[in-house]
Image: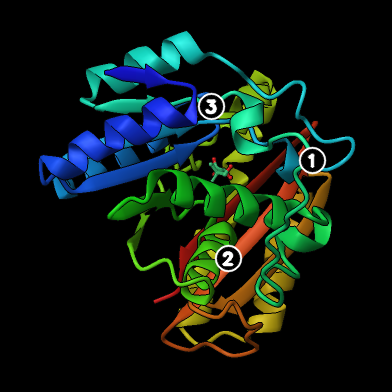
Amino acid sequence: MQIVRQLNPLRNALAEFRTAGLKIGLVPTMGALHAGHMRLVEVAKERCDAVVASIFVNPTQFGEGEDLDAYPRQEAADAALLKAAGVELLWAPTADQVYPSGYATNVSVSGISDGLCGAARPGHFDGVATVVAKLFNQTRPDAAFFGEKDYQQLAVIRRMARDLDFTHEIVGVPTVRDPDGLALSSRNAYLTAEERGKAVALPQAMQEAAIAIASGKPVAATLADAKARLLGSGFHQVDYFELRDADTLALLHDFTKSARLLAAGHIGRTRLIDNIPVS
Ligand code: PAF
């Protein structure tokens, strides 16, 4: 596996892949890789001939007081995992290769970035859309792979790709979970053993709410019960627990076939998010 940090060698390596007629898959990450990321790589390997993974802890998607400095950085271990999984190239740019001196451009996807995590993390999705647009331009993949765990992020990226004429495929990969149902996340590393035990209340409350809503229980009361259950199980704040349309993320007050539950809550110093289809 080649590890590349500068744009010129990246372009040369990608040109060789293209000359060889290889279909290029991009797996963008911020490192601290877990089985969820490795599933993205696995799907990319199934669908493409050459997989490019990127690791860049993108400062513009972290708000003030968020965990940019504390965000886990373990490039050597990540690179070993990616190599073992058969990744052809690791794009680990230095900061100036993404944000050169004088950088002044922002990609902002209005509407779909508002509400949900956008409400609690102002500017977060601008940072995501900007860096992902840059990664798409830098690598010009045939397909790019993102986890459904960050469902609003995936919806923002799909909208941005349509709006800015990126024609490659955007593939959403289902969430990988621990055996008890907790969605894998780099931020789970922040949980103490006691908090980790309580965190399972999130997927449990979501499953129960999804079953209730699909079986015709009133949506508002079901969501209120689910929030109360989280607050009674060790979460000290619930940012949202909402029913949304899976494609547009429009708020739903009644069950439809494309409904999806999305939730975010705080346990200890960790903010957890999750989402599941309601069917
Ligand atoms: O999901 C992530 O790891 C990041 O938000 C992404 C898509 C790599 C952009 O920095």
Q: Amino acid at mark 3?
A: Pro
Going from N to C along the chain, the mark reached first, 3 or 2, is: 3
- Along the line of sight, the residue nearer the viewer: 97 or 65: 97
The mark total stands at 3
Q: Please determine whether, in this image, residue 79 is positioned above or below residue 134.
A: above
Disc 3 is placed on an element classified as loop
Any part of residue 234 in sight:
no
- The quarter of the rendered structure image containing the C terminus is bottom left
Q: Residue at x 41, y 86 (%)?
A: 257
Q: Would you say residue 157 is visible in this rendering?
A: yes
Q: Position of 89 compared to 153: left or right?
A: left
> Which quarter holds ligand 1?
top right
Question: How far separated are the C-alphas under marks 3 and 2?
Answer: 23 Å
Residue identifier under label 2: 156
Q: Residues within 10 Å of mark 2 (few under 14, many from 20)?
A: many
Q: Is residue 131 left or right of residue 169?
A: right
Instruction: Identify the image quadrant of residue 58.
Output: top right
- Does 99 appear above or below 224? above
| The residue carrying mark 1 has its beta carbon less than 8 Å from ligand 1 | no
Query: x, y percentage for residue 199?
Result: 63, 38
Residue labelled with disc 3: 93
Q: Amino acid at mark 2?
A: Val
Residue at 38% x, 41% y: name it: 27
Q: Between 145 and 56, which is closer to the camera in this rendering?
A: 56
The crowding category of the residue bearing disc 3, from other C-alpha atoms within 10 Å (few below 14, some 14 to 19, many at least 20), is: some
Query: How far apart are the alpha carbons under marks 1 and 3?
Result: 17 Å
Reading the image, the residue beneath label 1 is 102
Give the SS element for disc 2. Answer: helix
Measured as percent of width and height from the top left, residue 64 is found at 89, 39
Looking at the image, which is closer to me, 276 or 32? Answer: 32
